[in-house]
Image (tube, helix red, strand yellow):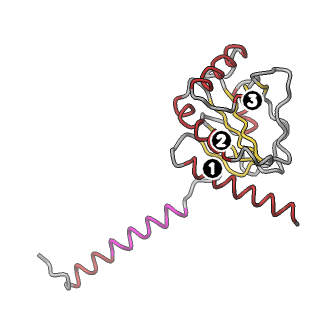
């Protein structure tokens, strides 16, 4: 056994420490690039409401919007949506915020009546009070992949009042709910500060 005061042991510990520190720095410096949609200004959404096919999609300008793409057939989506509904319920009194949940079919193009029935049934069973904000993608996933970089579900986009995508979460992680809520609050405060100036 080498005593703790041995110079070789101290040197080995220092080498290990430097290697670990270098790894941490390398990981931090090689953070993944932002989602391709971040910074993109959006126009009118290419979606149609499930409940009333004649109604237009909600406007993005002037609102802080949480735009979520989900599917009834997608287990991570079904786990994530209740958390987003909780966030929306907590901000129900703030007219500057809206949750827009876009129900997507698994095949890209789905029968609107079938999608409406499946989404409505899921929301009723899960007791999610967001049916008025559930839309379908009538143009298929290819259009959304092109305009928003949507590749997989669930995908959640935080959009500022200037209709610019600020943050994107892809996939489901339980910790995302708190992160999304905090990002929305920051954006609402930023929008309020901008109104005051």
| Number of other residues with Cα within 10 Å of mark 2, as a class: few under 14, some 14 to 19, many 20 or more | many
Q: Residue at x 65, y 52 (%)?
A: 34
| Mark toward the start of the polypeptide (3 vs 2) | 3
Q: Which mark is residue 156?
A: 2
Quarter of the figure with the C terminus: bottom right
Image position of 76 (left or right of 55): left
Label 3 crowd (10 A; few <14 / some 14-19 / many >=20): few
Separation of residues labelled 1 and 2 (CA atoms)? 9 Å
Disc 3 to disc 2, C-alpha distance = 18 Å
Pointer 3 residue: 132
Is 179 drawn above or below residue 145 in the view shown?
A: below
Percent position of residue 191, x then y: 80, 57
Pointer 3 with pointer 2, Cβ within 8 A:
no
Q: Secondary structure at mark 1?
A: helix
Q: Residues within 10 Å of mark 1 (few under 14, many from 20)?
A: many
The residue tagged 1 is 180
Residue 91's place in the image compared with 150, above or below, is: below
Say which of marks 3 and 2 sits in front.
Answer: 3
Q: How many marks?
A: 3
| Relative depth, front residue between 9 and 86 | 86
Residue 21 magenta-highlighted: yes
The answer to which image quadrant residue 99 occupies is: top right
Mark 3 or 1 closer to N-term?
3
Q: Are marks 3 and 1 in contact (CB under 8 Å)?
A: no
Whichever of callouts 1 and 2 sits on the residue coming sooner in the sequence is 2
The x, y position of residue 70, in whole percent, is: 63, 31
Residue 85, picture quadrant? top right
């Amino acid at each position: 056994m080498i005593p703790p005061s041995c110079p070789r042991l101290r040197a080995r510990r220092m080498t290990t420490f430097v290697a670990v520190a270098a790894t941490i720095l390398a990981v931090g410096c090689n953070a993944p690039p932002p989602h391709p949609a971040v910074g993109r200004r959006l126009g009118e959404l290419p979606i149609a409401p499930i409940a009333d096919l004649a109604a237009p999609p909600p406007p993005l300008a002037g609102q802080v919007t949480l735009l979520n793409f989900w599917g009834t057939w997608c287990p991570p989506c079904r786990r994530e949506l209740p958390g987003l509904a909780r966030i929306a319920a907590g901000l129900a009194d703030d007219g500057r915020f809206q949750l827009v949940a876009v129900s997507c079919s698994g095949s890209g193009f789905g029968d609107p009546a079938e999608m409406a029935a499946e989404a409505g049934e899921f929301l009723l069973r899960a007791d999610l009070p967001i049916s008025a904000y559930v839309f379908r993608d009538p143009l298929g996933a290819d259009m959304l992949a092109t305009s928003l970089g949507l590749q997989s579900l669930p995908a959640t986009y935080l959009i500022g009042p200037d209709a610019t995508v600020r943050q994107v979460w892809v996939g489901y992680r339980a910790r995302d709910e708190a992160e999304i809520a905090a990002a929305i609050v920051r954006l609402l405060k930023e929008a309020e500060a901008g109104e005051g100036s």
